[in-house]
């Protein structure tokens, strides 16, 4: 028993040391790459914008006289707070910077620049066998705040509604809360999933389910439904075309934020993402171009 | 000769010192982590119960003194619509947020750096008697007809006994950890109920009944299970197990506490099996033979000799199993549905403490109430595991005294 204790103790110690080392190392590397060497651009933030940034970074890094671009996810909020603490050069977000975040930048005498790089439409999805194919914003608000609990109340069969939400760290969650719920809170105890892919998976195997995902994630295993923002007069289905001509109402801009003082440094990449070539990437990944 | 001995003794001393040193370092590190955890966590109860840097403002004709976080949330969600429900006058409540002011006045009227914003806000709050406005302190309206609701700090009872976990609610987040604590306990307990008998069965088979060949194949195979990344288990649970559970029990949703428990049981099995099998195999041959010589059957020998002898090893196995179950994050995050409700049965969706920390810590602003609330959750988890390991230690000690 004693021997075992010692062995366990040793293993624990080594883990603790390993843990300490790796974390301090990464933070050091971050600091160096930002302040001293300046050979690469870091982009951090929203998982929604991630595919655009990754692909664009890949192409951009191959062009002449360009810097290396490294891209990480983590959520919109993570991106902004990393920008604030100089741990990233560009924050990619799927929501506008919050008033309180803006205040923090002002407080530290830092100016942030905002650039819209693409648009994304948010699709409301249900199980493919669900007969309901249209909902108004008011009905959606009722469903996600827990006031409407059965599909028969919105013209479907007699079946309980199971709404799925994203985790609170995602920009998609914030956007949905702002646009559809008008800043009200989701019903307490709503199911929440960690990723867009997991949402699609869950909706496809749960009959009474309803959820929201980026249009780029839509596939055959779920059904995107039409949404009306004028009380039921016109409904539009979530397609890239409808989002482009603005007939589909649930469209949000995707942003890059950077500090004004590093404008010179990130300019090359910013120009690239807004160029025709960069916008082609946006289209390929499944989002809507800014033009 | 003498020199060699001296050298030996010298090295022995050094190694001794090294062991002491590593022990001390471990102890200090653990202490340090614990202190860090608790210091960050306890700060929560000094934080205001509305978002930091913001205040709640009402018209001075309103006689409401203070509001609880739940009341504030229900006002802004439109569930409480009249002040008389809260003991005030009979007038309708109109919730107001800073962004609403930009819809009343054009942007140009606020001045270059928003220096006219407080005046405008003052105008709004003074005009409307039923208003409750949620505004940043630096633009606070300062008029005779405006009253600020006193900011209270988050109450301990609201945290530990609260039944709502809505950390992103504005103006007043709700940090009730009861559903998370119960969810964690439920998932881990059911996982153990599944894993312990199963694991013991396999361990007994491996150590007592299986031939050399079977053991040589089975044991490495089981230990291989421990090497699979937890996110793979989680994905397996979401795609295969959740629909299965949904079908078998005829449920509306497949992401339930039970699904999480089954996945956790599978993940804890390798630990439970290999540790308890080792303990059983350590039973001295002489004891086993003595039992058989006295005429005991194989089963009686296992039940009366091997298991009692291996008791401390088996309880260690169970504790390690609990440790794996209670702290597991990724797999649970994917299969339990993460609904922060009080669990009524194992067929409800639950949200566990580790899953909550993993999903939310990235977004929580460092040092804010949400961040502190998550750290305090870490403290709760830490206390749980300490209680479990201390009690297991005591159990295994007690048994030893009894048998000798």
Image: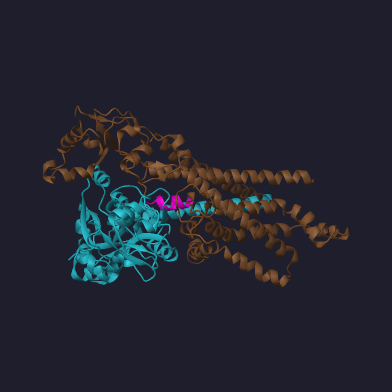
Chain colours: A cyan, B brown
Horizontal relation, residue B22 to residue A139: left or right: right
Decide if residue B274 is in sight here.
no
In the image, residue B124 lies at what x, y percent? 18, 36
In the image, residue A192 lies at what x, y percent? 41, 55
| In-front residue for pair A234/B279 | A234
Q: How many marks?
A: 0
- Quadrant of the rendered structure where residue A38 is? bottom left
Tell me what residue is drawn at x 22 percent, y 68 percent.
A279
In the image, residue B300 lies at what x, y percent? 81, 58
| In-front residue for pair A26/A182 | A182
- Which quadrant does the C terminus of chain A fall into? bottom left
Question: For the view shown, which residue lies furthest in the right direction?
Answer: B294
In the image, residue B56 lies at what x, y percent? 28, 35
Horizontal relation, residue B171 to residue A191: left or right: left
| In-front residue for pair B21/B375 | B375
Question: Main structural element of the magenta stretch: helix, strand or loop?
Answer: helix
Q: Is residue B90 above or below residue B207?
A: above
Residue extent of the magenta highlight: B354-362
Horizontal relation, residue B70 to residue B350: left or right: left
Q: Is residue A222 above or below residue A114?
A: below
| In-front residue for pair B304/A28 | B304
- Quadrant of the rendered structure where residue A143 is? bottom left
B128 within the magenta span: no
Horizontal relation, residue A267 to residue B229: left or right: left
Decide if residue A174 is in sight here.
yes
Tell me what residue is drawn at x 51 percent, y 67 percent.
B240
């Amino acid at each position: 028993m004693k021997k075992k204790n010692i062995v366990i103790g040793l293993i624990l110690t080594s883990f603790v040391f390993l843990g300490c080392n790796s974390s301090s190392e990464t933070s050091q590397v971050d600091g160096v790459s930002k302040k001293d060497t300046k050979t690469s651009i870091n982009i951090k933030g929203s998982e929604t914008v991630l595919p655009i940034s990754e692909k664009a970074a890949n192409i951009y890094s191959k062009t002449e006289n360009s810097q290396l671009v490294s891209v990480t996810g983590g959520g919109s909020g993570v991106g902004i707070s990393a920008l604030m603490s100089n741990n990233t050069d560009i924050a990619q977000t799927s929501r506008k910077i919050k008033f309180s975040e803006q205040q923090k930048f002002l407080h530290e005498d830092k100016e942030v620049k905002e650039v819209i790089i693409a648009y994304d439409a948010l699709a409301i999805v249900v199980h493919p066998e669900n007969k309901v194919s249209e909902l108004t914003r008011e009905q959606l608000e009722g469903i996600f705040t827990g006031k409407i609990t059965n599909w028969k109340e919105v013209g479907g069969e007699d079946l309980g509604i199971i709404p799925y939400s994203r985790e609170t760290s995602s920009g998609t969650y914030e956007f949905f809360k702002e646009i559809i719920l008008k800043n009200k809170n989701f019903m307490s105890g709503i199911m929440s999933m960690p990723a867009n892919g997991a949402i699609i998976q869950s909706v496809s195997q749960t009959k009474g389910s309803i959820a929201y995902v980026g249009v780029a994630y839509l596939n055959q295993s779920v059904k995107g439904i039409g949404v009306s923002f004028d009380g039921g007069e016109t409904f539009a289905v979530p397609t890239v075309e409808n989002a482009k001509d603005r007939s589909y109402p649930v469209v949000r801009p995707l942003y890059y934020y950077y500090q004004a003082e590093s404008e010179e440094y990130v300019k090359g990449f910013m120009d690239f993402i807004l160029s025709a070539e960069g916008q082609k990437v946006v289209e390929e990944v499944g989002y809507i171009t800014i033009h | 000769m003498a020199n060699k001995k001296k050298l030996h003794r010298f090295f022995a001393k050094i190694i001794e010192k090294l062991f002491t040193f590593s022990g001390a370092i471990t102890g200090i590190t653990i202490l340090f982590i614990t202190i860090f955890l608790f210091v960050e966590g306890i700060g929560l109860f000094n934080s205001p119960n509305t978002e930091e840097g913001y205040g709640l403002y009402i018209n001075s004709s309103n006689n409401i003194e203070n509001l609880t976080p739940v009341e504030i949330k229900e006002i802004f969600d439109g569930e409480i619509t009249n002040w008389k429900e809260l003991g005030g006058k009979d007038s309708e409540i109109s919730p107001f947020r800073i962004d609403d002011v930009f819809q009343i006045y054009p942007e140009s009227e606020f001045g270059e750096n928003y220096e006219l914003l407080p005046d405008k806000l003052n105008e709004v709050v003074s005009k409307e008697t039923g208003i409750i406005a949620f505004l940043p302190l630096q633009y606070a309206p300062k008029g005779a007809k405006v009253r600020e609701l006193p900011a209270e700090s988050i109450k301990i009872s609201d945290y530990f006994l609260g039944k709502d976990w809505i950390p992103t609610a504005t103006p007043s987040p709700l940090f009730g950890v009861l559903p998370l604590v119960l969810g964690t306990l439920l998932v881990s307990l059911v996982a153990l109920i599944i894993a312990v008998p199963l694991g013991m069965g396999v361990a007994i088979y491996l150590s007592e009944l299986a031939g050399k060949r079977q053991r040589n194949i089975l044991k490495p195979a089981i230990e291989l299970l421990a090497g699979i990344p937890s996110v793979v288990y989680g994905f397996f649970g979401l795609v295969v197990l959740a629909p299965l559970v949904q079908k078998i029990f005829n449920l509306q949703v497949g992401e339930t506490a039970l699904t999480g428990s089954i996945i956790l049981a599978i993940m804890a099995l390798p630990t439970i099996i290999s540790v308890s099998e080792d303990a059983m195999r350590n039973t001295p041959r002489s004891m086993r033979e003595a039992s058989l010589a006295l005429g005991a059957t194989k089963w009686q020998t296992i039940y009366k000799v091997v298991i009692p002898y291996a008791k401390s090893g088996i309880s260690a196995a169970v504790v390690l199993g609990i440790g794996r179950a209670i702290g597991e994050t990724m797999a649970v995050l994917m299969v339990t549905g993460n609904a922060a409700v009080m669990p009524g049965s194992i067929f409800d969706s639950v949200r566990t403490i580790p899953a909550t920390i993993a999903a939310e810590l990235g977004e929580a602003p460092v040092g804010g109430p949400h961040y502190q609330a998550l750290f305090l959750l870490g403290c709760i988890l830490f206390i749980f595991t300490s209680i479990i390991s201390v009690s297991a230690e005591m159990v295994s000690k007690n048994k030893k005294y009894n048998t000798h």
